[in-house]
Amino acid sequence: MASGNIPQFKSFSGADPKAVESTCQEYGLTSAEFNELHERCVAAKSTAYCPYSRFRVGASIISVDGVYFNGANVENASYPVGTCAERVALGKAVTEGHRKIKAVAVATDISPPASPCGMCRQFIREFSSLKSPIIMFDKDDNYVVLRLEEVSLLRFKQP
């Protein structure tokens, strides 16, 4: 599950084509890949099962060979055994033979956006480079993008 607010980083509008193009150039994505990740993670958020926290998270990943996988957080009454959206998406990718991830996108209903939790960061690290972009969208489709090595510096903070 995405965790903590990240106000110290510059955010951009997902609706600003110049910002998206600049992000894509810096992080090795095409505009089509960025937009597909954005649409998919926001759509995945609507499938979250979170009756306890009411904190919806959607994630989408793209493998290095261009295949997308989506996930949403799934909670359980035994609260710590829920599964984060990022790990749901990565689990789908891995079980279908895609073990090299190009980028991860996460969407939440808060602003500023939230970053992947420590467990998810480690999970992402198993299947991607420290240079892989993690794109984090807030409730208004603004985003912050950092490389995995930079996201690892973030700490949990209750929204």
Image: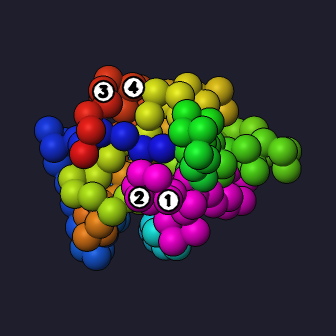
- Nearest the viewer among 149 and 124 is 124
Marks 3 and 2, how far apart in space? 21 Å
Closer mark to the observer between disc 1 and disc 4: 1
| Quarter of image, res 23 | bottom left
Separation of marks 1 and 3 at Cα, in angstroms: 25 Å
Q: Decide which of 139, 127 is in the foreground and name it.
A: 139
Q: Residues within 10 Å of mark 4 (few under 14, many from 20)?
A: some
**Residue type beneath disc 2:** Arg
Query: Mark 1 vs mark 3: which is more N-terminal?
Result: 1
Q: CA distance from mark 4 to mark 3?
A: 8 Å
Judging by the rendered image, the residue that carries numbered circle 3 is: 155
Whole-angstrom CA distance, mark 1 to mark 4, is 28 Å
Residue type at the position of mark 1: Pro
Above/below status of 15 relative to 81: below
Q: Is residue 69 magenta?
A: yes
Across and down, in percent, residue 43 comes to 52, 73
User: As shown in the figure, which amino acid type bears the numbered disc 4?
Assistant: Ser
